[in-house]
Image (cartoon, helix red, strand yellow):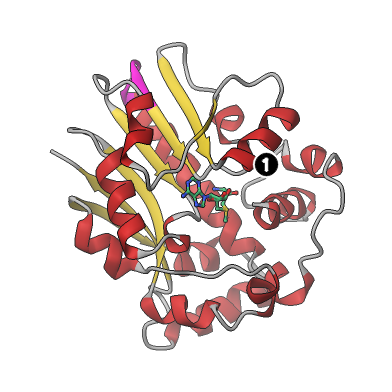
Amino acid sequence: MLWTLTMHAHDAASERPILNDPYAAELLARVDDPPDLGLSLGGNTPLICARAKLIDDIARGWLARHDEAVVLHLGCGLDSRVLRLDPGPGVQWFDVDQEPVIDLRRRLYPELRTAVAADVTDPASFDLFPADLPRLVLAEGLLMYLDPAGVDATVHGAMTRGSTLVADTVAPWVTWVAGLQPAMRAADTGFASSTADLARVAPRLVDELSLVDATATRTGGRTSTAVRLFALVPHARNAMVLQTYERA
Ligand SMILES: C[S@@+](CC[C@H](N)C(=O)[O-])C[C@H]1O[C@@H](n2cnc3c(N)ncnc32)[C@H](O)[C@@H]1O
C-alpha cells in the first residue's frame, strides 16, 4: 500500500499526471521511512495510476446512477478514493482493510469515519455492512494477493444480490513472474491467484479493460512506445485487466 501511495505522489508531481491524486504527497510526507521504489517498481507508476483513474471513473459513473447506496472499498490501503469521489449524503462508504492498516489509516485520515478493520476472506466480515441497498464493491490491487479460496470467499461474501464488483486481476503468468520480482521478495509478499481464479467464482462479467492498453493511451513518448511494443507480445495485453462483474 505504501508502494501505490508513493506512485500516486510521484504521478501527481509529474509533468503529465494520470491520476493526479491531490492527497498522496501530503500523506506520504507524514510516513516515516517512505519506500524507495527504485527503477523496477517505479516503472509501474503509470500502470498503477491508470488503474486507479479507471476505477475512479467507473465508480463515479456508478454513483451518478445510485443516490442511496453502499460502497465497499476492499483492501483500501491508504488510498484517498473517498475524498477524490466525494460521494453524496445517501452513500454509505466503507474503507475496509486489515487491522494494522486501518489503525494507520485512522491516524493519517483522522477526519474520515469510513475505515473498517476486517479480513475480507472471512464471510462474517460482511455482516458489518447494510445488505438492503445497491452495492458497489471495489477491489484494487487486492485479489491477486489472496489465494483462490480467499478470492472465492471475498467475492461470495461481498457480492449481495444486485451488486457490482470492479476488480483488477492478473494473468496466470504474471502471478508466477511477480514471485521473481526482487522488491516483492524483499517485502516477503507475492501474488497467489489470477484472472482464472476470479472468473471461476465471480458472477456475470459485464466489462473488461486491458490495463496495458490503458497505460499506453495515458502516457506519452518512450513510455507509451515501450508499452505499445510490450502489448504486441502474445498474452501481454491481458497481463493485468480491470473487470466488472454483476450479480443478478
Ligand atoms: C497492494 S495494496 C493496495 C492498496 C490500495 N487498494 C491501493 O491501490 O493503494 C493491497 C491491500 O490489500 C490489503 N489486504 C490484503 N489481504 C487482505 C485481507 N485478507 N483483508 C483485508 N485487506 C487485505 C492489504 O492490507 C493492502 O492494504
Q: Nearer the viewer, residue 221 or 44?
A: 44
Quick check: 39 above or below 105? below
10 Å crowding of disc 1: few (<14), some (14-19), many (20+): many
Q: Which residue is mark 1?
A: 21
Quick check: 73 above or below 130? below
Residue 215 quadrant: bottom right
Position of 42 with respect to 211 (left or right) is right
* Quadrant, the C terminus: top left
Q: Secondary structure at mark 1?
A: loop
Magenta region: which residues? 65-70
Q: Nearer the viewer, residue 159 or 204?
A: 159
Position of 227 with respect to 205 (left or right) is right
Quick check: 242 above or below 189? above
Q: Nearer the viewer, residue 210 or 179?
A: 179
Q: Position of residue 106 (x, y in %)?
A: 68, 28
Residue for point 34% across, 56% down: 151
Residue lying farthest to the bottom in this orientation = 233
Residue lying farthest to the top in this orientation = 89
